[in-house]
Amino acid sequence: MSIDKKYIEHFINVSSKAALASSYLVGKKDKIAADQAAVDSMRLELNKIDMNGKVVIGEGSLDEAPLLYTGELLGNKNGPKFDIAVDPLEGTNFAANNLPGAIAAIAIAEEGNLFNAPETYMDKIATGKIEKGLVDIDFPLKKNITNLSEFLNKDVSAITACILDRPRHKKIIDELTQLKVKIKLISDGDVLGALYVSNPKYNVDIFLGIGGGPEGVLAASALDAFDCHFQGRFIFDNDKDIKEAKEIGITDLNKKYELDEIIKGDSIFCATGITSSEVLSGIKITDDSYKSETLVTHKGSNFKEIIKKISSIKK
């Protein structure tokens, strides 16, 4: 089954309107307000769409998030059943402080095809299109880098690895430094970080490290359309997370998930820039219109493009 292409336009509208709503709060030092603006807008637009949508990755459970909570039903109840994953504002600190890389992101798949990720960390690894078994989350770092350099016919010192700049990654960063790999450190935003491997123009060969589990699922849905390699393993290191995992049906807490286990079948992914990055320009408002850039993938029609739009701002 393939998702009707007409939905591409609907979901571009959802992410671009959320990005616009959040853009009014860029640089205002209030990440909660910037996030809430994106949430409110995204929910409003999703409820206008002909679909029976269910949030499988949202802003948290009902008691934590009154809107776009995990399990919330969206759409006008006319149309296909979709699983929805949302990150209305990825990079809340970027938006609050007017730094590059804030995006509004959404992924949809047919019912049952989008992994219901727990609100935990995930160890992940992503590369562009490679041969199966060449890079694996269970391999030592040196083996992955060496295999990748041989496959890409590049010297190890010409390989670029992208990783979140966090104390937990000190050991990995130290080893990459010893191997003389180029390191691209990002301070937040690991959906965008993973997307760097989707196109050689971003000059990132591998993305790795520990980041948000829900963000891993969103990134996987986009990388799937690019035929990229992605693996993830959730980290359950406290009783609360273990209990929640079991409640949503995860029995093997150490399972390594391949990309086709995280996202199955057809999907649509949209990410709109709020503040500019190497991938997407941010929202630009002029008088009664705004310019947006959205990275869109639709696996079913092999559609992978950055859509630039000028839309009117309805007062």
Image: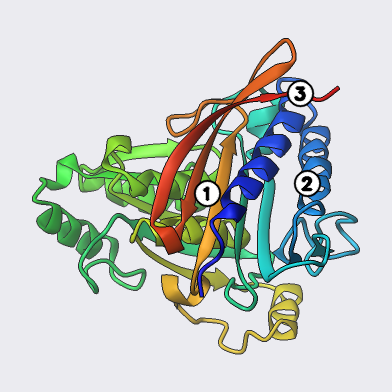
Amino acid marked by disc 2? Glu
Numbered disc in front, either 1 or 2: 2
The x, y position of residue 12, in whole percent, is 61, 43
User: Disc 1 designates what residue?
Assistant: 191
- The label shown at residue 45 is 2
- Mark 3, Cα crowd under 10 Å, few <14 / some 14-19 / many 20+, is few
Quick one: quadrant of the C terminus? top right
Q: Quadrant of residue 301?
A: bottom left
Residue 16 vs residue 204: left or right?
right
Q: CA distance from mark 1 to mark 2?
A: 22 Å
In this rendering, the count of numbered labels is 3
Q: Nearer the viewer, residue 95 or 306?
A: 306
Q: Quadrant of residue 209?
A: bottom left
The x, y position of residue 307, in whole percent, is 49, 36
Q: Nearer the viewer, residue 44 or 126?
A: 44
- The label shown at residue 83 is none
Amino acid marked by disc 1? Val
Specify whether residue 89 is in view: no
Specify whether residue 297 is in view: yes
Q: Nearer the viewer, residue 187 or 269?
A: 269
User: Disc 3 designates what residue?
Assistant: 313
- Mark 1, Cα crowd under 10 Å, few <14 / some 14-19 / many 20+, is many
Tell which residue pokes out farthest to the top in this image: 287
| Helix, strand or loop status at disc 3 | loop
